[in-house]
Amino acid sequence: MVSQDRDRSNFIVFPPLLLLVTIALPCLLQWFFPLGLLTTIDLRWRAVAGGLLLAAGVALSIVGGRALVRRGTNVNPLLPTLALDADGIFGWTRNPMYVGGGLLMLGIAVVFGIDWLPLVMVPSGLLLHFGIVRREEQYLAGKFGEEYRRYCAQVPRYFPGLAPGHHQESLR
């Protein structure tokens, strides 16, 4: 068997597909086995709170994608990373589009009363972390070396302030 070296992360699930499945599966579960927890909250409150989460998630994802395009690198994870972006939103979190996707999903769950979505987000988040993010970090460390390691030491993987004094470094 011939091995081809690809200039991209060796993720095990295409990231947008994980997002879509993580939204679609809970919708089916909710249809067939409704839990009815979120629907006990007044719709106006759900609409406001969920709408804010949804808007924040979309905004983070758009800002992250635009930042990569401005930097001159690819947004599509099937294509090579051409440059590191450590400024703007990438100076706050190394994964703004994944964080944005999480907020977007929580917003959808709250607005539409899909109780299963936060539950399915747990295994999905583990798959995202170990099957995508950690593999992307290995790829970027191999490609950009010490520059990427310094970036990891300064910027948290997901949320600022999540682990004070420890920036969720990618590789030790």
Image: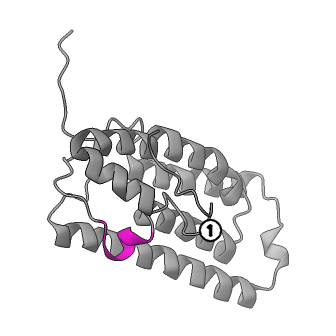
The quadrant holding residue 46 is: bottom right
The quadrant holding residue 30 is: bottom right
* Residue 116 % position (x, y): 71, 56
Report the side of 135 relative to 37 (left or right).
Answer: left
83 shown above or below 106: above
* Residue 122 % position (x, y): 66, 50
172 shown above or below 70: above
Write the residue at 17% across / 13% down. 2
Report the side of 151 relative to 98 (left or right).
Answer: left
Location of mark 1 (residue): 106
> Depth check: 57 or 143 in front?
143
78 in the magenta segment:
no
Local SS, label 1: helix
Task: Give the magenta-colored segment's residue range.
Answer: 86-92
> What scheme was used to colour the molecule?
one colour
Q: Amino acid at mark 1?
A: Leu
Figure label count: 1
Give the crowd class for mark 1: few <14, some 14-19, many >=20 residues within 10 Å: many
Give the quadrant of the N terminus. Answer: top left
* Residue 17 % position (x, y): 42, 49
